[in-house]
Image: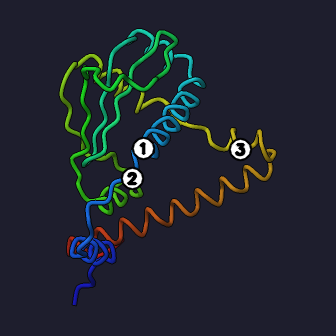
Amino acid sequence: MATQSPFLLLEGFLQNLPLPDLQPPAWAIEETQRRIVLLLNHILGQEKEATSRLARQKNRVVQLQWRSFSMSLVATAAGLLDQAAPDAKADLVLALTEESPLALAQALFQGNRPAVRIAGDVQLAAEVNWLADHVRWDLEEDLARVIGDVPAHTLAEGARAMLKALRQFAGGAAAVSAGKAPT
């Protein structure tokens, strides 16, 4: 008897719940988007090549979409990002095609990129792809500035071990749901 994935059970349960279409308040969405822009700029600011490439795309707008959530970012002359004006026309639209939050999380835990539908400027899409491939956040280094090198390294090692275990679990759950034996 094949064991059903807990992800599929949870997703089926959540889909059958008669929940109203809950939307966070506009101020919460706006503040979250501001924090995302700050985080992205912090990460971009650590990579000179990234800011240089992004500066060449100044005033170009990238719209990110997933389900009913949308966020538009504009490249600045400094090679960073800012929130685009609400009426700004997107030069590039990147839309996640996976509708299920659980399937999306499972793919990310497995280390896979989510499927994205791309519409718009091909050159801008190539630059965004380069950024996604080459820019990484050194969270351990940022954490070391706050709590010191040894505790930051210890926390990072623990987080890497947890992520590895989650990836193995997600990979095993995906194999079980596909009818294959987990490895």
Amino acid carrying label 1: it is Ile
What residue is drawn where x is 77% and y is 39%?
Answer: 145
Residue 139: quarter of image: top right
Residue 47: quarter of image: top right
Q: Residue tagged by mark 2?
A: 24
Residue 16: quarter of image: bottom left
Q: How far apart are marks 3 and 1 (CA)?
A: 26 Å
Q: The residue tagged with tag 2: helix, strand or loop?
A: loop
Camera-side mark, 3 or 2: 2
Residue with the most extreme bottom position: 1
Amino acid carrying label 2: it is Pro
Whether pointer 1 and pointer 2 mark residues with C-beta atoms closer than 8 Å, the reply is: yes
Q: Residue tagged by mark 3?
A: 143
What residue is drawn where x is 34% and y is 29%?
Answer: 72
Lower position in the chain sequence, tag 3 or tag 1: 1
What residue is drawn where x is 78% and y is 53%?
Answer: 151
- Horizontally, residue 133 falls left or right of residue 21, namely right
18 and 108: which is toward the camera: 18
Which labelled disc corresponds to residue 29? Answer: 1
Lower position in the chain sequence, tag 3 or tag 2: 2
Q: The residue tagged with tag 3: helix, strand or loop?
A: helix
Lower position in the chain sequence, tag 1 or tag 2: 2
- Horizontally, residue 158 falls left or right of residue 90, namely right
Q: Where is residue 17 in the image (x, y as percent from the top left)?
A: 25, 75
Which labelled disc corresponds to residue 87? Answer: none
Colour setup of the view:
rainbow
